[in-house]
Amino acid sequence: MLLTHGVVLGRSLLTVRTSALQYMAARAVPLRSLSTHTTAFRFTFAQPRPAQLANSPSRIQQRNISTLLHGSKSHQALSELRFPRGQQGRGARWEQHTKADYGSKRGNSYRNDPPRRTEITPETVIYLIISINGVVFLMWHTAMSRKDSLGDSKMLQMMMGNFATMWANVREGRIWTLITPAFSHVEPMHLMFNMFMLYSFGGDIAKLLGTKRFVLFYLGAALCGNLVSAVGRGVVLPLLRGDHSGIATPSLGASTSVVGITTLYACLFPTSTLHLFAIIPMPAWVAAVGLIGWDMWRVMSSEKSKTDGAGHLGGAAAALGYYWFRLRPHIRRLR
């Protein structure tokens, strides 16, 4: 009985399959549609069209200034704002993911990719500048102690000729003395104050500009400040007042770069609150204007001062020029 039912059931299934084949032959359906072998799962995703990308909201709400500072490639930055790289099709991202993680036809995979270059972080740059200032500070005191204890002034003369700004050094061709004083301090309080200001404001500026541009800005502000200081005390003051004392008076310290950093911070964040003497709150732009005005008064007055106001003004001028001609156009495009 069971055998009879089995034969009948088998014939019924054969009849159904034969009917299906006849139907598909009449409809011109390929036979591979009835293949009994299962295929692997495939994920297919529709690629977004350029028109859809243009109409979709941008995922970039706030971009780093460093991604916009490409010089002649500024048009690429604007195109990235309109068509961000993150808005790629999911299928394309999946393909990139599989090639990057599991290998591609070219043999690149996570096992044999070339090593990436390690990038210096903004915090590391700040600590490196502070460390260099500390080493030069120890060199100054070693030179002075050698002169006092041994009567040997060669090292002190070397420090004066290479780590101090004065018109005599520039006139003799030691142009590097327009930059090296930005890493040079003799008095401990001078070193501590400048490094504290660098640590307080330099980190934010380095994160915005990037490590390379921050270092260039630090050196550029030092160059402008020390050049104004050397020319002002060595050429301008002797012509205007007949005062030749500044020709041989050395000037040193990171104040030129630090004033440039604080001025640039005030330009980028004018409404941020700063506390004068850690007590009086005021906007950053008010503090910057007050400090620049104070340095201008000291330069114009005939009072003798240990503070190099001309160098401070040169560093502030470098920051204002960098902000106005380099950063401001890109910031306006983001608005």
Image: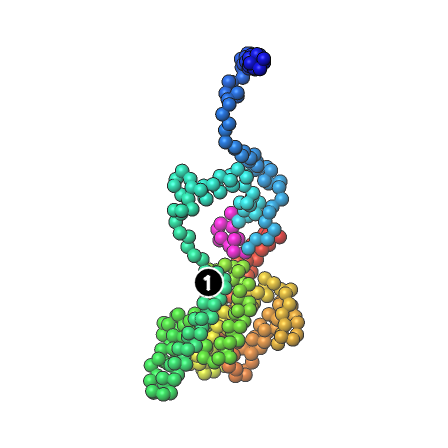
At 48% from the left edge and 80% from the top edge, which residue is drawn? 188
Which of 26 and 55 lies nearest the eye of the viewer? 26
- Residue 105 drawn at (x, y percent): 40, 38
- Residue 44 drawn at (x, y percent): 54, 33
Whether 197 is among the magenta residues is no
- Residue 123 drawn at (x, y percent): 50, 64
Under circle 1, the secondary element is helix
At 61% from the left edge and 63% from the top edge, which residue is drawn? 269
At 58% from the left edge and 55% from the top edge, which residue is drawn? 331
**Is 293 on the left or on the right of 187, as rendered?**
right
Whether 72 is among the magenta residues is yes
| Range covered by the magenta-colored residues | 65-76
Q: Is residue 321 visible?
A: no
**What residue is disc 1 on?**
216
Quadrant in which the N terminus appears:
top right
Name above or below for residue 94 compared with residue 331. Answer: above
Name which residue type carries label 1.
Answer: Leu
At 41% from the left edge and 78% from the top edge, which residue is drawn? 138
- Residue 296 drawn at (x, y percent): 56, 75
